[in-house]
Image (spheres, grey):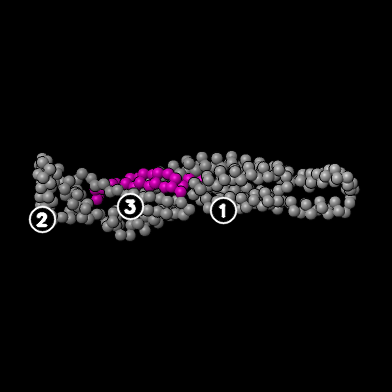
Amino acid sequence: MYSMTGYGRGTASDSTHGLTAIFELSAVNRKSLDAHIYAPREWNGFEQTCQGWLREQVQRGRIQIHLKIEYSNTIPSDSKLNWSEASFDASIQRLRQYAEKNDLPFEISGDFLLNLAKTLKEEDVTTDWRDIEATLKSAFQNALDDLNTMRKTEGKALANDLLQQLKDLEAQCQGIAQHAKETVGQHRDNLLQRLQKLGLELDLDDERLLKELALFADRSDISEEITRLNAHLEQFRSFIGSDKALGRKMDFLCQEIHRELNTTGSKASSIEITRAVLEGKNILERIREQVQNIE
């Protein structure tokens, strides 16, 4: 089981192009997969490719993907510097004017020229992502592995909590089933007591009494609801132990369990069943809150 929240970071270097790709992934809850990718604007088509990498391993959540490219201290020999001598001179002149205007020291050194050249290169043209696709995918996978490690750890904690909550809910449902068995007998005894107080004596085999008990039993029968509740709870437990992304199905099951509890509560004729239904709904609400965090 995986949570939908987490953070991951991954890097990979490319010595040929003199750069390092750094991916940072952050994930939060979302009903569907919603990815936002922040990469160089010049990289047409990269976003779709990155989406494909993500969809192979993530089904739900809002994922923010930040990509940063860091160039090494030396400019690779096979990379073409994309600036003219005129633009280089113009940049130096603007920097000199800015320094003079703000009364700042301005000295030109080899390091200064190299950093300026790298800046102009990175601003004017970014390495084509297709040339470094393998490096990018490796960095992305490292970040995704890191993210999934965190998501899996939190998912394990969620699973443990859900199992405990489910155990409590099953106990309430068992209580409902037990009280349901006693309902008709209690109603018969209460009815006879009321008749006796009114001075009316009826035999247990009286047709009118039997008819009243039959009608009551039919109105208060929750055997079908209990059967469906048990089936839903059993399926929910199997989902917790699955290694698939079943967050949507678990959410749907919660809705179905809530429906059955509502029907049971509307038919309830004893205070014990009503109390068990209310407590069951409280537990179910806690389960639903946790399910919202599951992929």
Q: Position of residue 280 (x, y in %)?
A: 63, 44
At x 20%, y 44%, the residue is 73
Residue 59 in view (yes/no): no
Residues shaded magenta: 1-29
Within-10-Å neighbours for mark 2: few <14, some 14–19, many 20+: few
**For the residue marked with disc 3, what is the amino acid?**
Tyr
How crowded pointer 3 is (Cα within 10 Å; few <14, some 14-19, many 20+) is rated as: some
The numbered disc on residue 86 is 2
Q: Which residue corresponds to mark 1?
A: 252
Numbered label attached to residue 38: 3
Q: Amino acid at mark 2?
A: Ala
Taking the image as drawn, is residue 50 in sight? yes
Give the mark nearest the N terminus, 1 or 2: 2
Q: CA distance from mark 1 to mark 2?
A: 65 Å
The image's mark for residue 19 is none
| Mark closest to the chain's N terminus, 3 or 1 | 3
Helix, strand, or loop for circle 3? strand
Image coords of residue 167 (percent x, y): 62, 41
Q: Give coordinates of residue 3: x percent, y percent.
A: 48, 45
In the rendered image, residue 22 lying in the magenta stretch gets the answer yes
Q: CA distance from mark 2 to mark 3?
A: 32 Å
Q: Is residue 231 left or right of residue 29?
A: right
Task: Give the alpha-carbon distance from disc 3 to disc 1, as whole Å.
Answer: 33 Å
The residue at 17%/46% (across/down) is 115
> What amino acid type should be assigned to the residue bearing mark 1?
Phe
